[in-house]
Amino acid sequence: MAGKKTMTLNLTGPEMLALEELSKKKELNKTAVLRQALRLYQMVEMRIEQGDKVMFENEVSKEKAELMLL
Amino acid sequence: MSRDVSPISLYSVSENGPVDAELFHDITEEELMDWQTSWLPSLAEGMQKLKQKGVLRADWPESAHWNWRDKASKIEGLLACPCFCIKTQGMTQGMIQLNLVKSARLPQQTGRPLVFIDYIENAPWNRPKLHTPPRFKGVGSILVRAAIELSIAEEWDGRIGLHSLPQANNFYSSDCGMTDLGKDADYENLRYFEMSPDQAKAFVMKGNQS
Amino acid sequence: MKIEITREWCINMAQMEGDVEVGAGLLALDPDVADTAVEANVVETGEDPQLAFGPFVQLMRRQIGLSVEELANKADVDMSDIINIEKRHHYTPEPRTVVRLSQVFELPSKRLMQLSGNADIRDRHFKEEAVRFAAKSGSIERLTNSERKAINTFVAILNKDET
């Protein structure tokens, strides 16, 4: 397996705050949060390339909304 | 290109003892060719015998129609979908495909990330329904252990989850000690099982007791 | 990632396993057709290089962005011919159809003749590559990255001189 590489991240105040909040909520360190975000983004991107749509569905109302990705 | 691999052992039924095996941290073309050229013909032969014996279809292997090439091509290159396989004596004995972007459902674990088992399958000659006696034992336990170890490496404390095929419900509830959260209507009504950090510790401890 | 699982652990767990099934994952198959689905898997992923021709034509067609009808018109062949080539496992088209397709795809007609079952394949390496390609081709609508990679690799092989 390839060794790990180090990267410096420049985040705004609100972005850092969001990262810290997710980190606290998920009980993950910040690197782990970003790693999850990357996995999720790559997977969603692949499904969209294959012609799938990514939707949110409200469990109660069953209302659906599409997640838009550029 | 070198592969990540961990030495393990399987139990050989004919030799009544351990044989050296390897847990590879991926599934490659080599294993897919094993599936195609060895697993499939063995499955087809096994199903023929079941048919001839008049065994009820409900008792036939439930994953016999799975296409591992299709599965592999759908997840190719995805960081979220690591795989493992077990090989011994030059042949693939079991395969597992994992998913790293799902969350726990157990109360007290809800919303926390876990290693989800998308698919797990034993080679046909290791399955008691198709081969009496089975050739090797231990494939299922080792692949579940691999999922737990990955969960620990991710700092998710060993949490894992899966939807069991009906014939394997007992393996996951009794042998693995997982919690049965009931039938999942979003997953063909398969039973959803989850392992908490404590259950993961207990599973590992179980094998360490002589 | 380092995983350490002792021999003792493996054997203890194996002996405790008993005679169990361990499968997990989506079923999505009516048990009444399980045996034919297994047979279909065996046939579809079998070792007959002619199994590569249908998927190859379909992938090339999708790669150049043509519908079945558009390809038929461009190659001046019957639409039913293209449909049969793409859908029926052991359909051997007329040599004229194969030549016309090779002109549209800009590939050596000799290789396509072999792939379509109109001529024997003597080159073992080509035969193996054809079987490998057949095994890798799926049936989803858009070309995935791996399908694109598979077809580009196979096109390079078709363009190589016969050894």
Image (spheres, rainbow, N blue to C red):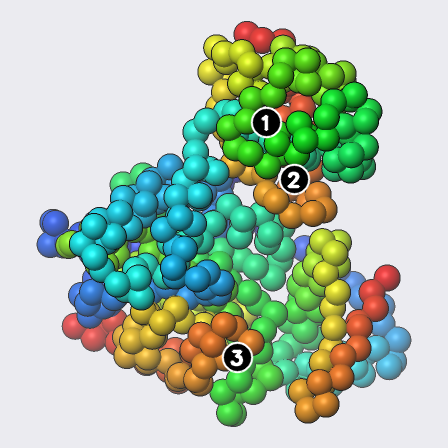
For disc 3, the neighbor class at 10 Å (few under 14, some 14 to 19, many from 20) is: few
The quadrant holding residue C119 is top right
Is residue B110 left or right of B66 when viewed as pictured? right
Residue under circle 2?
C147
Residue under circle 3?
B185
Q: Secondary structure at mark 3?
A: helix
Residue under circle 1?
C53
For disc 2, the neighbor class at 10 Å (few under 14, some 14 to 19, many from 20) is: many
Q: Chain of mark 2?
A: C
**Image position, residue C162 (x, y; %):** 58, 9
What residue lies at 56% left-to-right and 87% top-to-bottom? B110
Distance (Cα) linking label 1 and label 2: 14 Å
Mark 1 and mark 2 lie on one chain; the one further toward the N terminus is 1
Amino acid at the residue labelled 1 = Phe
Q: Chain of mark 3?
A: B
Instruction: Report how many numbered discs are placed on residues in the image.
Output: 3
Q: Which mark is residue B72?
A: none
